[in-house]
Amino acid sequence: MEKLFYLLRRLFYALLVLLGVITIVFFISHLVPGDPTLALVGPSAPQDIIDGMRAKFGLDKPLLVQYVYYLKNLILHQDLGFSIQNQRPVAEDIRRYFPATFELVTVAMLFAVLIAVPVGVLSAVRRDRWEDHLSRLIALSGISMPVFWLGLLLQLLLAYHLRWTPLHGRVLLDVVTKHPVPSVTGLLTFDALLTGNWAVLLDAIKHFILPAITLSYPSIALIARMTRSSMLEVMNLEYVRAALALGIPRWKVIFRHALPNAIIPTLTIIGMAYSYLLGGTVLVETIFDWPGLGLYAVNGIFALDYPAIVSVTLIFGFFRVMINLIVDFCYFFLDPRITLESGV
Amino acid sequence: MWKSFDPLDWRHKKIEYVYRLKEFRYTLRQIRRSPLTLTGIGIIALFLLTALFAPWIAPHPEDASNAVHMEAGFKTPSLKHLFGTDDMGRDIFSRVIMGSRISIMVGCVVVFISFVIGVPLGLIAGYRGGRISELIMRIADMFMSIPYLLMALTVAAVLGPNLRNAMIAISIPWWPIYARLARAQTLTVKNELYIRSAKAIGASSSRILVRHILPNCLPPLIVQSSIQFGQAILTAAALGFIGIGAPPPTPEWGLMVSVGRTYMPDRWWLTLFPGAAIFVTTLGFNLFGDGMRDVLDPRVRR
């Protein structure tokens, strides 16, 4: 009962944060200096057209009334406004571009965890040796690396000179036309896997390599550092020292006894790492011509398509809150020691 | 007159002084033992000196603005032009050097704004606790839920593309980091004896916060500021790369990479060198910040 109450409270809290995110995004979108309708109709438009536009978008109402309308439309009709660059509702665009971004972010996250956890363990076990210094240097390079620059260099080296991977894009068009993928989940690579479409799957994986490496590097850094410090903490605990004293092989103690406990705090950093990944998509998708939300937002900037940019920010905020909620739940089920009071 | 000279007080001061000196020496020794922290300090020093003397170091300082030497365009790196020349024939080495001044400005402004907003809020939240704390920290959570690069991008896009707006845009998502840190730090010192004594004497809350709690919160905040400084440079470069930071022909490093991208893959030097400047500078601040965090962390101290 107490547990259920805890979970419900987390859920309520997530909803509250969501509402906050919507509010922040709404007010940011109304920072536009001057009149957003002027950008639409041009500064030389006659006054009655401007007034008509203002009335149409509800801009003649007070800010608070606009906020209530925005909230109502968003929740009841999933209405995110109208995209200027594509001349259709933003919600439609989001549905169209989200799967590509979701796939990229997920693959990058898996990649990051697979690399970062062993690196973190290694540098904790070999503390203050050269392995530790090296992995610290690699990790700190990760959060210092301009993602766009790394992407361009990898493109130059691996795709252009060595020709190991495709230069950009998500999948070759003639591969998909020759082997069409039926839409099961809407996620191209996943659908190809489900339907056994190996040609498309292989091509998609090839296209994944560079963007996923580029995108995940900062997260690798973050997760590796966290794994290291929580491993160090666990390795000093008595049960680990006792296990070592009993003569259980060191690798077995590390992987069987220490790591499972050390990995739990690492979970919390995952939410943070998603922040890097989602933000990074804007840059990585631009460089690799990845048809996702990041590229959509960047194109929106140059088309002065404010509803599009603002909506992408909103969606990524949603995504982030959901991830946090999932992490919270995992944490709860994995760690029986969790104190029901100190949930935040 | 005599009252002001209290031998006991003087002895206390001396003890405190000796203690502080010891602490300081210990810190120095820790730093000396860590080659990576030293590297970080070296990079930061080099960066600051470069920015300070930029017009004298740069062989062609006039290339930082819109000088055009079309006949010298796209020269590969050589002794005459260490990093080569760009599409307008400008010396990239000079532009990178001059660009360090922009990075310093961005770092200082962003750290200052987010510090000034975040730290007072964090102090109040930690000291007062209760509802005010809940409110401030929940708002901080909401801000932190939006990926910061995206929020910066949105704010910059909405405000209009220029360097000033980019700096505002980068500061907005970052105050919660300072608020959280200041709050956590306040919570650890708030029940110390000296704070309770100050309260017992009748010191006002604002005096306690500013004179007693804030100084004790500073070390981790300063370390964080070093890391934030690097991140500010990185984020400004990202905005510049997308095209909503400084307008051309500003020698902003991200913008230079963005221009260089159009001439990839044959004219790689347009991209390589400005990007390397971003990377090395940010790395310096991160190495320093990370090293100092270990030095200041009481759990690691022996």
Image: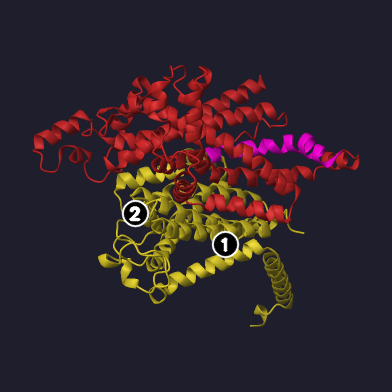
Chain colours: A red, B yellow
The residue singled out by tag 2 in the image is B259
Residue A292 picture location, percent across and down = 40, 33
Residue A133 picture location, percent across and down = 68, 56
* Label 2: few (<14), some (14–19) or many (≥20) C-alpha neighbours in 10 Å: some
Q: CA distance from mark 1 to mark 2?
A: 49 Å
Q: Main secondary structure of the magenta part?
A: helix
Query: Could you tell me the amino acid type at mark 1?
Result: Arg
Query: Could you tell me the amino acid type at mark 2?
Result: Val
Q: Quadrant of residue A306?
A: top left
A269 within the magenta span = yes
Circles 1 and 2 on the same subunit: yes
Work out whether A303 lies above or below B51. Answer: above
The residue singled out by tag 1 in the image is B211
Highlighted magenta segment, given as a residue range: A249-275
Work out whether B118 lies above or below A314. Answer: below
Q: Quadrant of the C terminus of chain B?
A: bottom right
Residue B91 left/right relative to A324:
left
In which chain is the residue bearing label 2?
Answer: B
Q: Residue furthest right?
A: A246
Residue B189 left/right relative to B260:
right
Whether residue B282 is visible: yes
Work out whether A314 lies above or below B246. Answer: above
* Label 1: few (<14), some (14–19) or many (≥20) C-alpha neighbours in 10 Å: few
Asked which secondary structure carries label 2, the reply is helix
